[in-house]
Image (cartoon, rainbow, N blue to C red):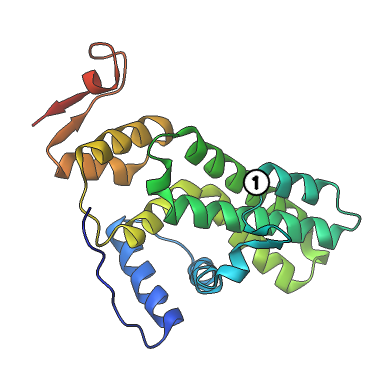
Amino acid sequence: MPEARVQPVANLKEYFKDALHAALLNQHLSVEGETEHYVVSLLTLFARSEALFDCAPEGTHLKPLVVLLSEAMEARTRVERNRGLQRLGDVSLFVAGFFAQGFARKLIDIDYHIAMGGRAYGTLAEALSGGVRAPRRARALALVFAELAEKFQMIVDALNELSESAYTHSDRDILRLYELWLKTGSRRSFRLLKRLGIEPVARGTAGAGPEAGMRPH
């Protein structure tokens, strides 16, 4: 297993700002400044484990997305519901972006996070838009959440680049990248496969099995 390179950082928020901006440029993804700022703030917040994980008598844990969704839908007030949807979107984005290596043997999970997170942000955007009568801040946040919903997969790709910047891909990772490309259409996975000497081919155009859909250059 390759050793991770530890890089000292004086200002975590500035580090994430520069790293995310570079990843977005590398992914040829354009987002509004407010959206980029939101993601940077999210990364900075979740860099503290207590902000990401929930505390319980048995220890810290990450609530399943279905529980977060249930809590949001059963909230007694609109404010609590919106807060729950935001938490669902935020956790989905962070986990899909930074824990993608953990999905190596269960690709359904990354599909699930992308679908749940994008839907949560989209629902939240609709709830906050409220027409011209909505407060200016709510309308501004609605635009941010709408863009996060629309470009969720592509932003996940950019976050994957941040998390894997010091990672060397193994043969198992190549299979994971291929499955990820098949399931989500990840442009980053497609480019990485090409860079690793693999020509991705959708299933059904080659022989049976996952490996049959990949051809070396």
* Viewer-proximal residue among 68 and 154: 68
Residue at (53% x, 48% y) in the render: 150
Q: In the displayed structure, would residue 111 be above or below residue 14?
A: above
Residue 98: x, y in percent?
43, 56
* Viewer-proximal residue among 41 and 26: 41
Query: Residue 60 sits in which quadrant?
Result: bottom right
Query: Which residue ends up furthest to the right in the rendered image?
Result: 76
With 44 as the anchor, is 199 left or right in this view?
left
Q: Tell me the crowding category of disc 1: few under 14, some 14 to 19, or many 20 or more residues within 10 angstroms, Cα based.
A: few
Residue at (74% x, 61% y) in the render: 57
Q: In the displayed structure, would residue 40 be above or below residue 205?
A: below
Query: Which residue ends up furthest to the bottom in the rendered image?
Result: 10
Q: What kind of element bears circle 1?
A: loop
With 178 as the anchor, is 149 left or right in this view?
right
Residue 52: x, y in percent?
59, 64
Residue 26: x, y in percent?
27, 59
* Viewer-proximal residue among 51 and 208: 51
Q: How many marks?
A: 1
Residue at (24% x, 62% y) in the render: 166
The residue wearing badge 1 is: 64
Q: Quadrant of the C terminus?
A: top left
Give the amino acid at mark 1. Answer: Pro
Query: Which residue ends up furthest to the left in the rendered image?
Result: 217
